[in-house]
Image (cartoon, grey):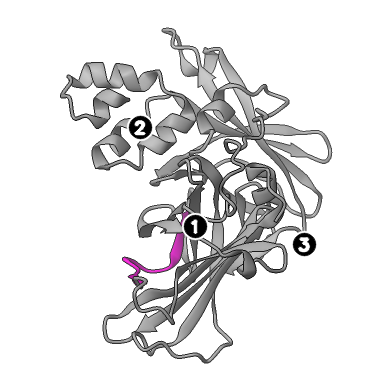
Amino acid sequence: MLLFLTGIRMSPEVTEKIISYLDAGSLFCLSFVNKHFHELADNKSLGVTWEITVKEARGRENRIKHTHVYFGQASLTVGWSSGKWSTLDKPTTLELHGVKLVPINCPITCRPGWRSLLSKVVVKKDAGKLYGSDRLISLLYIENGVTVGVWQKQQEIAFVLVNLHYHRLVERNLLGSSATPYEATDMQAPFDDIDPDYGLHSYSVHLELHNTEDSIASVSFSQLFCRKDQIADGFVPLQVISKENRQTRQTPLGGKISLPWRTEALQGCVENCCMLTLTILAEAQTPFWCVSAPVAMTKSKHKEVSYACKGESFLMEYQDSDGKLEIELEWTEEQKQFVIVNLILFLSISKVNRYFRRDY
């Protein structure tokens, strides 16, 4: 790695050979150095495909191969827009596998391979969280990055989208079994008994809003911190963009907030909904919280006015066991675009204490 950072020029073949020896965590951190390293670390020649096994309540099984993949900056979105799906009148189990086929000269249908379980979810009526809809389908977020498009009239699965963050994705695709997923060991930061605020400062954040076709916004921030007296309600708040602080940069979005979808016969677009990929690195530039999931944009109930933007206000929110985030956007009629005017992250204090071995 030192050869890269000192600027010594090497042939592409030698560079790719060195890159091939790096583990997934090192590749992930390398991708944030610059554009060239991002392209090297983002080599998509792993040779993995993805399959969903549909298991109905009456015992029938059906395997469906993915139809398309969107590669983002820190995650990928895998889509299944064809295949035989079930209705939601009875619970249906969806098992997602990464499949690595053996590179031998024979038809793909006969080629042996290794199947690694990535996630397993149960889809049923009135399950999941509704994130958006159009006149044909409703988008339901189940869990573990799995989003299901459901025909509104037939109440039948129309398509499936799965968000996979790059962090530990190589291990998850290759080191699990067909029945059990890869279980990563919990990482901890190096022990530090000198810094009284260890675990409260020097965070880096990369945030991307995207859909299944394009990136909508991509921003990075560093040196984020929280004071001890700001810890409240079980969370460590990190103010990334603030309406009150003009020194924080308010970020315009480069596209519409929408989520295109397609099946074998039809296609459409759900407005005010997209994918969120969040990566938080700790002080040592190690992944602390990595997530990729759908988010919905709703009108804000607050009537606060920003001096920079005086348009209508909207909110995006996400929460899981590791933390939550709140994004406030305002519509600028003059530029005809959304602007992120407020962004705050809340890290779970239990995760911070566990990772940094503290007792805040």
Closer to the camera in the image, 249 or 207: 249
- The disc label shown at residue 126, or none: 3
Region in magenta: 251-263
Instruction: Please determine whether, in this image, residue 294 is positioned above or below residue 332.
Output: above
Select label 1 or label 2 by which is in front.
2
Note whether residue 134 is visible. Answer: no
Crowd tier of the residue under label 2, counting other residues whose Cα lies within 10 Å: few below 14, some 14–19, many 20 or above: many
Q: Is residue 47 left or right of residue 189?
A: left
The three-letter code of the residue at mark 3 reads: Asp
Instruction: Please determine whether, in this image, residue 356 is positioned above or below residue 186.
Output: below
- The residue carrying mark 2 is 41
Q: Residue furthest top?
A: 105
- The residue carrying mark 1 is 275
Closer to the camera in the image, 308 or 53: 308
Q: CA distance from mark 1 to mark 2?
A: 22 Å
Note whether residue 90 is visible. Answer: yes
Q: Residue furthest front?
A: 194
Q: Quadrant of the N terminus?
A: top left
User: For residue 249, which quarter of the picture?
Assistant: bottom left
Mark toward the start of the polypeptide (1 vs 2)? 2
Q: CA distance from mark 1 to mark 3?
A: 22 Å
Instruction: Please determine whether, in this image, residue 296 is positioned above or below residue 7.
Output: below
- Magenta stretch containing residue 297, yes or no? no
Where disc 1 sits, the SS reads: strand
Closer to the camera in the image, 6 or 299: 6
Mark toward the start of the polypeptide (1 vs 3)? 3
The three-letter code of the residue at mark 1 reads: Met
x, y percent for residue 152: 64, 65
Q: Is residue 109 left or right of residue 350?
A: left
Where disc 2 sits, the SS reads: helix
Q: CA distance from mark 2 to mark 3?
A: 41 Å
